[in-house]
Amino acid sequence: MNLHSILLKREAEGRPVRVGLIGAGKFGSMYLSQIPRTPGIHLVGLADLSPPRAKAALAHVGWSAERSEATSLEHAAKTGMTCIIDDGMALIKSDHIDVVIDATGHPAVGIAHVLACCEHKKHIVMVNVEADALAGPLLAERARAAGIVYSLAYGDQPALICEQVDWARAAGFEVIAAGKGTKYLPMYHASTPDTVWDHYGITAEDAKLGGMNAQMFNSFLDGTKSAIEMAAVANATGLKPASYGLQFPACGVDDLPRLLRPQTEGGLLQHRGQVEVISSLERDTRPVFRDLRWGVYVTFAADSDYVRRCFKEYGLLTDSTGNYSSMYKPYHLIGLELGISVASVALRGEPTGAPIAWHGDVAATAKRDLQPGEMLDGEGGFTVYGKLMPAVDSVAQGVLPLGLAHKLKLVRKVSAGQPVRWSDVAFDETDPAVRFRREMESSSLHHHGAR
């Protein structure tokens, strides 16, 4: 853990890491708040479709107006200021940027940004986990071939889970399960932007005053975001989803070793080495005792008498056999922690998590009976939610990935709870994101798991 000392050295040498951020939303704003406090980092460019919004975001997190008045990226690089533009591709093409951050949340845009980074030799930090879940395994493969680093974003739960998995494995433990906590009830899968605030216990008026986006918040509630994030974790760690996806068991931190162990030994897991999300609510809506709603966890095995005895001697909480224990982190700090990725990528050439396999996929799944002629409205909307499934199954069944289930017209009826398939929708084969995803499906990635 010496990133800070290397950043201090870069600062002293007058060679800061030159960063370009695309997207000045909540995640981007949280990172912006930390840049002035971090040595060795220079935000050369900030790209947003609305430059006034980007300027407002900087002001909101405490930047002085003068700091962001560079007239060009070159001017910014020379003066230590920041240039605000409306073109993310211009950041990627610039000779004055070392690391690009995609904080757009748009799957198709994310694919285009990564491919451009491959062409222009820029490292890429993907806050855009939606694009990673849609096509991350092939994007990471392209990045490796181009000699750039493709990285998940530290502060988001997938990268924090990857860190815990790496810790356990590097210490010699087999990882039995890894995942995160969330607020979940089965009824949430049918939630829409019209019902989301009822579940959060706030009024639509208050949500609007707070600038809260109903569709975005609904994607957290209806299970979609959990599926997306666990697909990213499965693909970055080699852990696998269960054949049925996520169970969302109600589980507090004290029950992790007991519940997140194999079914054959009294737990809930289909197999050793599984991704799973735990709920902070019991199925009867009571709060779980010592829940992990905001955090991440890893469960691991002793698998020897000596290590089981060490677990006991050092007070680790275990299951009844003493063989399984867990570590957890109660919170994640979103964009406030993103600097870890930027520093790791730029200074060490190491991602904070990146796809190594294609194990998990996210299926567009009908929230209600859908009729021919209806238009799919994507993540967090009225028509579909994302369900985690093994990639080998999604490809074999011709399932439509959630990341492309936006503005596509149905040509067949799809019953509630069923996956939407490619054959159920009219789509444009020439669309770049569709073409890239279809290339990944037809490649050997899903046959071999990893290249």
Image: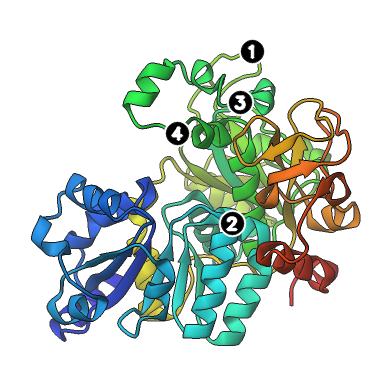
Question: At x 81% / y 42%, what residue is drawn?
Answer: 420
Badge 4 amino acid: Asn
Badge 2 amino acid: Pro
Residue 2 seen in the figure? no
Instruction: Provide the secondary structure element on which disc 1 rests.
Output: loop
In the rendered image of this protein, does residue 125 appear above or below residue 367? below
Of marks 2 and 4, which one's residue comes earlier in the chain?
Answer: 2
In the rendered image of this protein, does residue 244 appear above or below residue 447? above
Of marks 1 and 4, which one's residue comes earlier in the chain?
Answer: 4
Q: Which residue is mark 2?
A: 107
Q: Position of residue 421 (x, y in %)?
A: 84, 47
Closer to the camera, 6 or 45? Answer: 45
Q: Position of residue 345 (x, y in %)?
A: 42, 74
Q: Which mark is residue 213?
A: 4
Choose top left, top right, bottom left or bottom right for residue 446. Answer: bottom right
On-image quarter of the C terminus: bottom right
The Cα–Cα distance between marks 2 and 4, rounded to whole angstroms, is: 18 Å
